[in-house]
Structures are given as structure tokens and as C-alpha cells.
């Protein structure tokens, strides 16, 4: 029985090795057909990941590694990070070529795992691939959501938040240190939250802030699932999919409640005193959704992703 088990294990390892060799051979053939800038030698499967991770330091400092590699291979070099081919630009002159001369060629972005789960399948402008939907959302942001008139309408709320911050600092105990980083972060979140969903809807700030902090933290981590997009097992082993899905459900519950409150509010165009209700970003998006004036519909998921 043990001999039979060892035999099958050996066969599995041989087949797995042949699979890896085939993949690497194909990648080398494909890369040989491309005109790529210079770059360091790559290892099978991991490419140049070891040169970003192994710096003789306990801290992960990819910017230091990239600086050292750029000094050796020039202001434009290519790296292989897992299955991803990456161009690294470290010169202002070369960057100008990318962002001005050849901006359309390099206008797309990778489909990151966090954007797929948290942003309802890349339904926001930040994570959406370049195309008709992205151009439509940019137009909406520039003309409807973040136009000069809309920004000016946020000024009274911003002044109130800054005034409350100054009052809280003035009322603090004498001689007791104040964590300005935390207070300024809370100020920034309060302004963003109230501009997006309104003064009354942004009441449960603590739970929303906790979800958004967790989202930013997960979005900024080094994700193996993004480096090996075709290896679904990496998503399971890393646990990132489970964490993002759990956090997505929390965020979706909060944003869904906010949208429902706005839909109820929009059923009457005035408040109890007969005054016109002040519009926030969610109100504008709901109005655009109802108008149906866009070639790509503004769906409920698009509204949720934009708010997040």
C-alpha cells in the first residue's frame, strides 16, 4: 500500500514539474517575441519577486529594491512578478512619454482582485478598465459629482467640521497629548462621508470608518492572488478572497441602507419646513439612474461602488 501511494505521489510530482516547465517555456517564447527594455534575469515561476523581497532586511521595501535595479538597468526596465509583466519607469523624461505621448497605449490598468470583489466587478472609476464605462464615469464625476458648483455646496459642511475639530482641541485637557493624525483622519473621513451620503445618513460613522480602514489596509497589501491570476488555488491559500468577501458584505449592508434612506427622502422633494432638500452625491447618482440618459446604465451596484 505504501509503495502504491509513493508511486502515485511520484507520478503527480513529475506531471506537476512538466507542467511548470511547459508554462515557463511558453513564457520565454512569448517574451522573446516582444521588444522589451532591459531587466534582471528571472527565476522560474516567481520571476523577479525574490529581488523585491530579499533585501537583507526584515521590512518589505520594494521602492529601495526598484531604485537599486534602476541604477543598474536604466530608467526603463521590465520585471516579471509572478505571471505579471511589469514596466518600471524611474525617470521624469520617460514618464512624460508614457503619460503624454503614449497615454492611450498605457491607459489601461490591471484587474486587481480587491476591485473585482469590493467594487462589484470593477463598477467604479478607480478600478474600472479603460473604456466606454470609465469615460462615462469620468464625465459624470467632472460634470455632476465633483464640479465647481458641487464643491462649493460642500463648503458650509466643511467649515462646520473644521470648527468642531478646533473646539474639541481647545477643550482637551491641559498637558495631555493629542493625536492629531487620528483627529485629522477622522475629519477627512467625516467630510468625505457627509459629501457623499449627506449629513443625516452618515450617522453610523464608526462602523463605516472601520470597514473603510480595513478595505484600505487590504487594498494596499502585497497580494499573491494578483500576481498569479490564473492560479485560483492561490486565492484560497492566501485567504484574501474570504477576507474581502466578508468585508464586502459588511460594506454592502451599510451602503444599501444609505441608498434606501435616500430613496425614501427623494419620494418628497422638500423637508418638513418646506425647504428644498440639499443634494449629496448619492442623490445625484440616483437622479442620473432614473434619467436613463447614458448609453451604459447607472445601476445600483455602480452607485454603491462610487460611494465606496
Image (tube, rainbow, N blue to C red):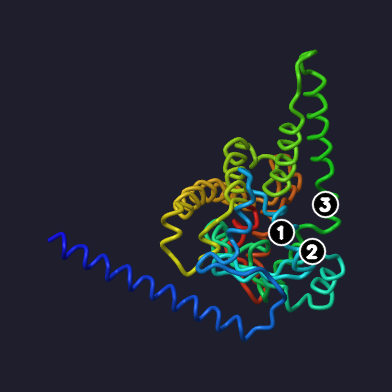
Q: Do the numbered discs 2 and 1 sit on residues whose CB atoms are within 8 Å?
A: yes
How far separated are the C-alphas under marks 2 and 1?
A: 9 Å
Q: Earlier in the sequence, mark 2 or mark 1?
A: 1
Residue where numbered disc 1 is placed: 66
Rendered residue at 60%/52% (across/down): 54
How far separated are the C-alphas under marks 3 and 1?
A: 38 Å
Q: Which mark is residue 219?
A: none
How far separated are the C-alphas under marks 3 and 2?
A: 35 Å
Find residue 169 and report its horizontal and vertical position in percent: 80, 23
Question: Within 10 angstroms of label 2, few (less than 14), some, or many (20 or more) residues?
Answer: some
Question: Within 10 angstroms of label 1, few (less than 14), some, or many (20 or more) residues?
Answer: some
User: Which numbered disc, 3 or 2, marks the residue closer to the eye?
Assistant: 2
Asked whether 4 or 211 is in front, the reply is 4
Number of numbered tags placed on the structure image: 3
Question: Within 10 angstroms of label 3, few (less than 14), some, or many (20 or more) residues?
Answer: few
Quarter holding residue 204: top right
Say which element carries label 3: helix
Residue situated furthest left in the rendering: 1
Say which element carries label 2: loop
Q: Do the numbered discs 3 and 1 sit on residues whose CB atoms are within 8 Å?
A: no
Residue where numbered disc 2 is placed: 90
Quarter holding residue 188: top right
Q: Do the numbered discs 3 and 2 sit on residues whose CB atoms are within 8 Å?
A: no
Q: Earlier in the sequence, mark 3 or mark 2?
A: 2
Asked whether 67 or 120 is in front, the reply is 67
Quarter holding residue 206: top right
Residue where numbered disc 3 is placed: 151
Amino acid at each position: 500500500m505504501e509503495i502504491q501511494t509513493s508511486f502515485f505521489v511520484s507520478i503527480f510530482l513529475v506531471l506537476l514539474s512538466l507542467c511548470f516547465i511547459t508554462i515557463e517555456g511558453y513564457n520565454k517564447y512569448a517574451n522573446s517575441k516582444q521588444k522589451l527594455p532591459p531587466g534582471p534575469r528571472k527565476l522560474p515561476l516567481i520571476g523577479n519577486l525574490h529581488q523585491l523581497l530579499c533585501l537583507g532586511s526584515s521590512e518589505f521595501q520594494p521602492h529601495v529594491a526598484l531604485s537599486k535595479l534602476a541604477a543598474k538597468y536604466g530608467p526603463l526596465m521590465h520585471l516579471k512578478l509572478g505571471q505579471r509583466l511589469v514596466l518600471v519607469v524611474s525617470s521624469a523624461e520617460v514618464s512624460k512619454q508614457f503619460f503624454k505621448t503614449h497615454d492611450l497605449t498605457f491607459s489601461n490598468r490591471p484587474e486587481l482582485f480587491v476591485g473585482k470583489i469590493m467594487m462589484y466587478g470593477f463598477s467604479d472609476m478607480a478600478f474600472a478598465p479603460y473604456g466606454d464605462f470609465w469615460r462615462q464615469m469620468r464625465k459624470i464625476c467632472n460634470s455632476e459629482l465633483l464640479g465647481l458648483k458641487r464643491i462649493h455646496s460642500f463648503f458650509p459642511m466643511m467649515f462646520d467640521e473644521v470648527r468642531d475639530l478646533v473646539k474639541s482641541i481647545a477643550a482637551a485637557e491641559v498637558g495631555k497629548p493629542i493625536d492629531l493624525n487620528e483627529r485629522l483622519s477622522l475629519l477627512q473621513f467625516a467630510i468625505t462621508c457627509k459629501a457623499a451620503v449627506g449629513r443625516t445618513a452618515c450617522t453610523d460613522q464608526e462602523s463605516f470608518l472601520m470597514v473603510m480602514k480595513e478595505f484600505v489596509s487590504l487594498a494596499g497589501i502585497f497580494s499573491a492572488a494578483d500576481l498569479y491570476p490564473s492560479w485560483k488555488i492561490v486565492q484560497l491559500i492566501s485567504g484574501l478572497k474570504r477576507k474581502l468577501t466578508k468585508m464586502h458584505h459588511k460594506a454592502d449592508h451599510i451602503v444599501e441602507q444609505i441608498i434606501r434612506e435616500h430613496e425614501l427622502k427623494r419620494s418628497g422633494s422638500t423637508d418638513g419646513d418646506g425647504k428644498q432638500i440639499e443634494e449629496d452625491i448619492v442623490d445625484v447618482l440616483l437622479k442620473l439612474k432614473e434619467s436613463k440618459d447614458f448609453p451604459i446604465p447607472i445601476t445600483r451596484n455602480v452607485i454603491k461602488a462610487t460611494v465606496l
